[in-house]
Each structure stands twice: as C-alpha cells, then as structure tokens.
Amino acid sequence: MPICSFYIQQLKLSNYKSYSFKEFNFSEKLNFIVGNNGVGKTNLLDAVYYSCLSKSYFSSDLMVPNFQDAFFRIETNVSLGVDNQLVEFKYLKQEKKEISLNKVKVEKLTSFVGKYPCVFITPDDNQLILGASEIRRKFIDATLCQFSSDYLLHLVSYNKVLTQRNALLKSFYEKRTFDNALLDVYNQQLVQAGNFIHQFRKDFMLQFVPVFEKYYRQIFDGDEQIDIHYHSDLLDNDYATLLETTQEQDRVAQRTTKGIHLDDIVFEMKNFPLKKIASQGQQKTVLLSMKLAQFELLKIEKQVMPLLLLDDIFDKLDSGRITKIFQLIKSESFGQVFISDTDIDKIEQLIENNNCKQYKIIPLD
C-alpha cells in the first residue's frame, strides 16, 4: 500500500504566542524559517505541531495566548492524500477548547490524535538524554498515542486511577485507616490499563531499537555502539502480584512505588551512561536518530507521511553531519519538512549544494 501524502498548505494564527495575526503559506516539501532569535521561529513550528496534535509542544493551552488576550485561534488548510481539509482550533480561557474538521465539531480527542502524524525536534530535546525518566516516557507516549487511540484511552485511564490511588494512600496515612477492598478496586483498574500500556511499550521498543541504530550509523561515521535498554517493573513481575507485595511500602510512602509510571529508556555507550561521556555532537546525533526512528515507525504504522519539524538543529553539528541529515530529509523518504535557523547564508548554501527544487524560504523579522 502506498504511503498517503500529507502536508500543510496554509496556516492562519490569531493570538498564538507572539503572533497577533499572521498567515503563512508553505511548500509541500522544504520550508526554511529564517530569522534572528526571538522573532517567532519556534512559535511558528509549535503552531504547526498544534495543528497536528491539538496541543503545544512546550506549554499548556493556558500559556499559549498573547499575554493581553484570553483566546487564540488556529486555522489550518491540510492536504491529506487527495483531500483538502480545514482544521480549526478555538480556545477561550475558562471554556473548553473546540476542534473542528471541515466545519464539523470533533467530539472526541482520541478520534483526532494520530490523524496527522508529526515529529518535532528542538534543542531542548537533549533532556531526552540528560533529563529525568518522565521525559523519556513522554517521548514513548507521544509516539504511541499517535499510533493508537486505544493506547491514548488506556494512558488517560491509568493516569487517572494512579492519581486516585495515590490520594487514597495519602488519606489512609492521614486518617490512620485502611480499606483493603477499596484499594483492591483501584489495583484492578491499574493492572488492566498498566498491562495494556506495558505490552505496547515493549513491542514498540523492539521495533524502535533497530531503526534507531540504522539512522545513527547513517549520520555518524564512527564505529561507536549505542545500547538502548527498556527498564520497567513489569518486565520480570506480574503487576497484580507486584502491587500486592509492595502494599505496605506504598502505605508508608503514600504513593504507588512500582508500576509503568516509572518506566525508563537507558542509553549506554561503552557500558557507561551516555549522558556522562558523550560529547554535545554525539548527544545531538543520538537525539536526531531517536526522532528519525520515531518518524519512520509513525509512517509505517499510520501509512501517512508525517511532518518533520526541525528547530535550530544544525548547531553543534559539523558540516559533514549537516550534509548527511539534509540529504536524508530532502529524499523521497520524507514529506513536508520545516527547518528553522538564524543563518540565511548557511541555508542558501545548503539549498544550492543539494540542488533543492521544491522549497520555500520564510523570513521572519
């Protein structure tokens, strides 16, 4: 089955972060967003991401509107296969966000997420390597929620039950009481959703690692091996039994101390943690390889060409790696790509050296 094409034709922003009102038209292949720091390059990429996933990559809806305003609006003209579609987002503080597709209100978020696959790469993504486990779990979840509406439903359910169970444990501690029957109700719900999520994550990592290794070898010339390990309490334990055996520990800690909410991905190089020995260039190469693997798996799963958003990614990379990355993303394996950078001369040189035909430069000032 051929991969369905997908690209954004036009974007209209009202009160979206630094934009009071702005309209953008895009090339269906390469789009270069160029300007000095602080002119809104990242905000524009974030608006594209919002158009695909109905949320900002960086902040909650509450923080999106201009400081002076209580609302924002995004209007996006999308080409998906042979169809032209209109996606609209309306947000007013204190009211529920509205999403409409071709003027018809979208009632369930799960029916929207995953329709327009998208991968975003930003400088702050180095926290995937350097930061806490929560950031790496979000990376897996951001991918799998686009894979499957069932995964999104189970993730929402798990997080809700986890919050309720933790509140119950805290209540037990404060009131010096204990209700095993009530705790067991939450345990059963946690186990059901947790097992589903764990199986999805485990299957995803089996797919992810070889694709990551392929891209890492393409970008990096050396012979270094990056090892990726998926850590989960459920790899060697039955979840129901685990909750039972840690019940007293949970009561003392006033929280659920074991479960898939503590899953992690561990990166190693030469049997050492990657974050301790890798250079900035190596870290960025690992990060890019992760996101390109995410891109490929989304494309295979959805049979739709995802968008690729690259925010200031060429910093800390040598010219050889920049050329390899650029040759990759301009190939037919990728669809619409957005690249932000401060250096117009560097961008024009890349365009000339790689004989780009389908592109648009969008200057911001």
Image (cartoon, helix red, strand yellow):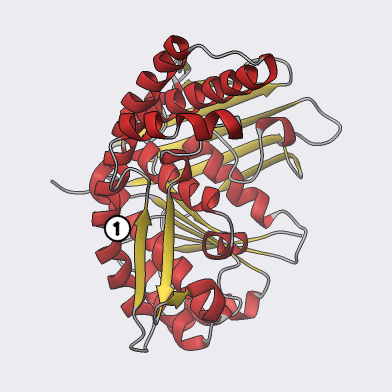
Q: Residues within 10 Å of mark 1 (few under 14, many from 20)?
A: some
Coordinates of residue 13 in the picture (x, y in percent): 66, 37
Check the picture and name the quadrant holding the C terminus.
Answer: bottom right
Q: Nearer the viewer, residue 280 or 38?
A: 280
What residue is shown with label 1? 208
Residue at point 57% right, 40% down?
11
Q: Amino acid at mark 1?
A: Phe
Q: Nearer the viewer, residue 203 or 98?
A: 203
164 vs 336: above or below: above
SS for dot 1: helix
Say which of 247 and 80 sits in front.
247
Judged left or right of residue 335, residue 38 is right
In-image side of 341 versus 300 (left or right): right
Total tally of numbered discs in the picture: 1
Rendered location of residue 310, percent (x, y): 52, 61
Horizontal and vertical percent for residue 247? Answer: 46, 29
Residue at image location 24% in from the left, 55% down from the top: 206
**Residue 28 in sight from this viewpoint:** yes
Q: Give the residue furthest to the left.
A: 1
In the image, residue 240 above or below residue 353? above
Relative to 5, does residue 209 appear above or below in the rendering? below
Choose top left, top right, bottom left or bottom right for residue 170. top right
Q: Is residue 355 visible?
A: no
Please tell me which residue is depicted at 49% across the width and 79% down the height of the picture: 282
Which residue is at 43% across, 27% downward? 158
Hey, which residue is sitting farthest right in the picture?
68
Please tell me which residue lies in front, 321 or 105: 321
On the image, the x and y values in percent for residue 142 come to: 44, 43
